[in-house]
Amino acid sequence: MSETILVSIQRPTALENKTVQSISVPGQDLWLNAVTNVHIIPTKVNVERFKAAVARAAARYPPVAGRLIREGDEWRASDAKAMLDFTLALSALYEDLDAPESNLPLAPSFYRHVYPHPYSPSCPSLSDGYLWRMPHLAQDYQLSKLMGVYSKGEESTELLRLRFTAKSMERMFAALGPHGTEENELKLNVHDAFTAYLVAALNKSLENPVRRVINIVGYRAPPKFVKNLTSFAPWAHPAAQGNGMLAMISDPLAEADLQELLPIARHIRAHINLARDPEFLERFFTLGSFFMAKSANAGQEGRYHCFMPDEGDTTLNSNFGIFIANPPSGGDTPSKGTPQDADVSFLILSAFKEKFISIVKHDHEDVIVDDGGYHPKVAEGESKEGPQLYH
């Protein structure tokens, strides 16, 4: 039988000594597309310790214990970043109620940056240079119509799941050849090589190739830069609460580069770097924040955004999901710093799925394909059901 347990937040909270105890929610934080999370803990929980950990973690991140409140066209409350850091703090405090500061996420900053109205006389014109980068924000839908758009987009597609080994990704990086040797040349990494390979493989498979790559980019400074933030905008501080992501749409790839690893990798990295430029962020969110607030304030229920890519686009880290692979059931967890395999899942047009699988298997024999029936060769002593993917 389930039981509801109420927890009182430890006082004082991180906001209690401040002049304002609620958080304003600007447009760029108003994500109405809800994501339901279910956390499964594969062990028996010490209820009293868990309650104490929740009380302390919520005091550090009080917005998670609040509600989203609308006052006219103004919104106040919590956000996803506070929830993420709260979850990390809860985990650390459950293990050790007296956990040192170094074991917890950075102490939160509740700074809120207010962007000017993009169509005010004092704001420079942004439409020509930035509107084309955010069709997913400029266009919104009633929830019932949004579901219809997604359903129609998925009619001719199938889910495909792959597992790439760490060694195969190292081969992709090596295939880039010499790069990053010049002072002003882009520094590429394994992620750039991996995503470039996926785009190139798609372009060898599809009738209409991918020309624009959409990356879901985290623009906040990594925690290691917390003492040196001169190159980051104040709202990009790693401890800032609020939305820290944007969908960065690239310029079109050159025709000659559609299947070439190095040009694609450079193209992807250049646009990720641009998405973290303070001047770009200021202009992007001046317009983007306006559209998000406009959708949230449209009627009693608001309107919703569609993130399904158009033909000729592909979205990495969203519709095209890339995750660190979980170890097989009963397997050992890799030690920190050890190269790890990666799981990839995405919807692919049914007509081109087998061709894509054939190209990937030809390039990387150690890839595991799980599409509900396609399995790699079974090694001696291995289950005939084939390797499984775990998420």
Image: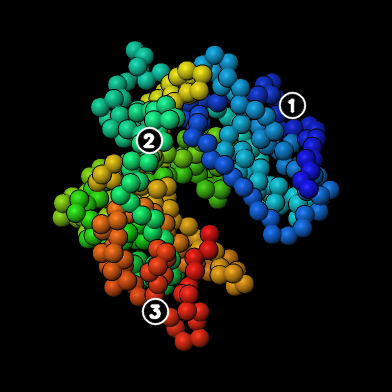
Residue type at the position of mark 2: Gly
Find out whether the residues at labels 2 and 1 contact each other: C-beta distance under 8 Å: no
Q: Nearer the viewer, residue 296 or 272?
A: 296
Q: Which mark is residue 9?
A: none
Instruction: Name which residue lies at 28% across and 64% down.
Output: 354
Q: Indicate left or right for 382 with 184 as reference.
A: right
Applied colour scheme: rainbow
Q: CA distance from mark 3 to mark 1?
A: 63 Å
Residue for badge 1? 17
Residue type at the position of mark 3: Lys
Residue for badge 3? 377
Residue type at the position of mark 1: Asn
Find out whether the residues at labels 3 and 1 contact each other: C-beta distance under 8 Å: no
Above or below for 364 versus 322: below
Instruction: Name which residue lies at 40% across and 48% down.
Output: 319
Residue 109, position as x, y percentages in the image = 61, 34
Residue 22, position as x, y percentages in the image = 65, 24
Instruction: Name which residue lies at 49% across and 35% down.
Output: 33
Q: Earlier in the sequence, mark 3 or mark 1?
A: 1
Q: Earlier in the sequence, mark 2 or mark 3?
A: 2
Q: CA distance from mark 2 to mark 3?
A: 40 Å
Q: CA distance from mark 2 to mark 1?
A: 47 Å
Residue 291, position as x, y percentages in the image = 40, 25
Q: Nearer the viewer, residue 148 or 199?
A: 148
Q: Residue extending furthest bottom?
A: 380
Question: Is residue 289 in view?
Answer: no
Above or below for 142 versus 217: above
Q: Which mark is residue 148?
A: 2
